[in-house]
Image (spheres, rainbow, N blue to C red):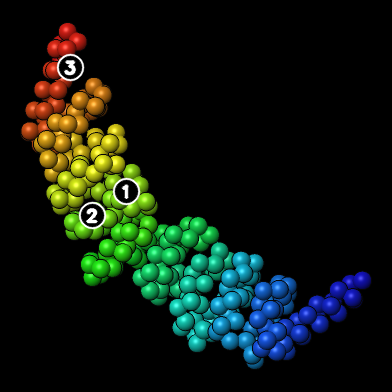
């Protein structure tokens, strides 16, 4: 039996190595793991076959390394994307591929659940690093389609059109909004946009962050205070760098509640 298995394996490897161009299109989807390296040795195997092969999630690292080692294949954006997204690509190869991807392939990669988490994070880092140099049109597209960190970074930049789209983005998370509000260097118009947004201005933790932010318009602060707990008010009042007008509003709100309940503020 072992001899039969060995003979069958040898036959499959030989077939992969000598298959016709038409047969290769089928083999890249069906060849067993042991025969995969032999496919790359086939003289008919080209960049198009490499792209198809990268769709398989069962590729061994040696095959992925071999594909990356072919400079003519690795120069193709689709091949680089396939290497970057593949869960079995050796880390150094995946990292190098990410750094060479075009902007919107980075976006695709960052939103791909099957890609390794650290690779998605690196893709996000690369997008955020490019933001200052991007034309407005691309920023607006990113505001609609980009991952949460990119949407948050666009809000923090403060361009009115990008801020509006990013705040409406389905990918934006509360944690990213809070991160924006924790940055005192964020433009006032970005803070105002959050304070006026129908979704984010209703979130409890966002309201607390807005009250603490010196750029929040006073009418918004006054509107948020009645919905905060006494504990929230007390914690905010402890802040050393709280704007004087906000501290005054806090004292007034605490006094109002004390008067209403008949207790001392």
Give the quarter of the figure containing the C terminus. top left
Question: At 54% from the left edge and 67% from the top edge, which residue is drawn?
Answer: 86
Helix, strand or loop under label 2? helix
Q: Residue furthest right?
A: 1
Image side of residue 86 versus residue 14, left or right: left
Residue 176: give its label.
1
Q: CA distance from mark 1 to mark 2?
A: 13 Å
Question: At 19% from the left edge and 10% from the top edge, which residue is drawn?
Answer: 261
- Residue placed under numbered mark 2 in the picture: 163
Residue 257: give its label.
3
Can residue 205 be seen here? Answer: no
Mark 1 or 2: in front is 2
Q: Local crowd at mark 3 within 10 Å, few (<14), some, or many (≥20)?
A: some
Relative to the observer, which residue lies in front, 85 or 242? 85
Please tell me in which quadrant of the rendered image residue 90 appears.
Answer: bottom right
Question: At 15% from the left edge and 34% from the top edge, which residue is drawn?
Answer: 221
Q: CA distance from mark 3 to mark 2?
A: 36 Å
Helix, strand or loop under label 3? helix
């Amino acid at each position: 039996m072992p001899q039969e298995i060995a003979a069958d394996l040898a036959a499959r490897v030989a077939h992969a190595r000598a298959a016709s161009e038409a047969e290769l299109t089928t083999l890249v989807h069906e060849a067993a793991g042991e025969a995969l390296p032999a496919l790359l040795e086939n003289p008919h195997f080209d960049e198009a076959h490499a792209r198809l092969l990268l769709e398989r999630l069962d590729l061994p690292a040696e095959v992925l390394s071999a594909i990356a080692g072919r400079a003519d294949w690795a120069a193709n954006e689709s091949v680089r994307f396939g290497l970057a997204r593949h869960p079995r690509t050796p880390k150094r190869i995946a990292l190098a591929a990410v750094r060479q991807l075009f902007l919107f392939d980075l976006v695709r990669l960052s939103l791909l659940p099957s890609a390794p988490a650290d690779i998605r994070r690196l893709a996000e880092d690369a997008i955020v690093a490019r933001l200052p140099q991007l034309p407005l049109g691309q920023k607006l597209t990113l505001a609609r389609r980009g991952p949460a960190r990119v949407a948050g970074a666009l809000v923090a930049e403060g361009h009115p059109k990008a801020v509006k789209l990013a705040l409406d983005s389905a990918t934006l998370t509360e944690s990213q909004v809070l991160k924006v509000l924790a940055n005192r260097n964020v433009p006032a118009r970005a803070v105002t946009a959050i304070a006026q947004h129908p979704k984010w201005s209703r979130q409890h933790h966002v309201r607390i962050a807005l009250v603490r932010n010196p750029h929040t318009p006073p009418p918004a602060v006054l509107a948020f205070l009645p919905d905060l707990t006494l504990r929230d008010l007390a914690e905010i009042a402890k802040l050393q760098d709280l704007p004087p007008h906000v501290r005054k509003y806090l004292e007034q709100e605490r006094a109002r509640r004390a008067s209403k309940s008949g207790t001392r503020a």
